[in-house]
Amino acid sequence: MSQVPNGRTHSVFHDTRDLTPFREGYVRTPVRGLADGVGGMLSGVLSGRDGARLSVLGTVPRPRMMASRPAKAMHDAVFSATEPERLIALGRMYPGWAGLCHIMAGLLAYKQGSYLRASELLRRGLTTRIDDDASQFSAAYLGQVVTRVEVAERIEVPVFFSEESVFLALSHCLREMGLTESALEAVVGLPPSLPSALARCTAAYSLGRYGDVVVWTEGLLNTDDLSAALLLIRARAQRTRGDLEGAQSALKEVLRRRKTSLALRNDAITDRALLALDQGRRTLTPWSKRQLPPAELETVDVIRKDAEMRRLWESDFRELGGQ
């Protein structure tokens, strides 16, 4: 949970908006990553679009008949460019569009895996003011642009063009560059949602802020793969803090839903086995706890003391009997 100005707290993973920019997230595995790559290549060929361009849900929107020259140039650059340089040059040509050009160039660089360049372009675009024409173009044409953002290890979420897509992409770039503190700051101001909570808790866990992770994920249930991944981070944070029972409860919630991703279930089973080792148990059954050595030594000492007392009693008894 997170603190708000009036002193109350609210969850960082429960989105109260009617419409969100997120599509269904998924867990990336080696086999699925290969299949997605081949599928994306085939779909790109069949749809006539290059895989290096920005992804669009459905067909590319057509430019309006009475659109201005900058709007037509921007439309062509956004939906046809495969290199960020074209958008950067357009921003130099039309200063009022520079902020939007840098953001779109940054998202394009992010899709191509150029994290350092993407972070520079996204940060410059966020700090550059755009004019009304650029803002109207963004509302009219960019709503169908989709960015696949990695919000946690192996967890990707397709996000429609919005504030979330830009800041989540920037946060991932900063994590890849080792700037974890800056990555956390990039997502702190986003509206509550599971993807932003995953990015937030991933950065906080890397920084060793385990208490914050536990507080932010209080009351979370396993409703989909994103929440299951967030519960795994919560369990690891609790285990690191020494709260083994809380970690066990979080892992149990991950395994409760049968349709949870197999990769996440395997991670939960592995973490549960590590918890058993931390508790000194040979198996996961309740009666498998090992006997602690101090208790065994104490029992031996008691037996030795009883034997000594019996020897002294027998010696005194013989003396009284005249033996």
Image (tube, grey):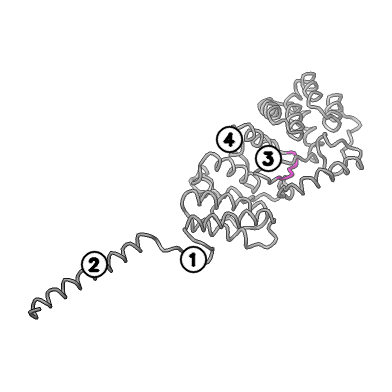
Q: Are marks 2 and 1 in contact (CB under 8 Å)?
A: no
N-terminal of the pair, mark 1 or mark 4, is 4
Label 1 packing within 10 angstroms: few (<14), some (14-19), many (20+): few
Instruction: Please name the amino acid that badge 3 sits on.
Output: Glu
Q: In the rendered image, which residue does mark 4 sit on?
A: 180
Q: Is residue 287 above or below residue 158?
A: below
3D distance between C-alphas at marks 2 and 4: 60 Å
Mark 3, secondary structure of its residue: helix
Residue at the bottom extreme? Answer: 321
| Disc 4 residue type (three-letter) | Thr
Q: What crowding class fits label 3: few (fewer than 14 Cα within 10 Å), some (14-19), or many (20 or more)?
A: many
Q: Which residue is mark 3?
A: 164
292 or 186, nearer to the observer: 292
Label 3 to label 1: alpha-carbon separation: 47 Å
Q: Quadrant of residue 67?
A: top right
Image spot of residue 248 (x, y percent) = 53, 58
Report which quarter residue 134 is drawn in: top right
Residue at image location 71% in from the left, 29% down from the top: 118
Q: Residues within 10 Å of mark 4 (few under 14, many from 20)?
A: many
Q: Secondary structure at mark 2?
A: helix
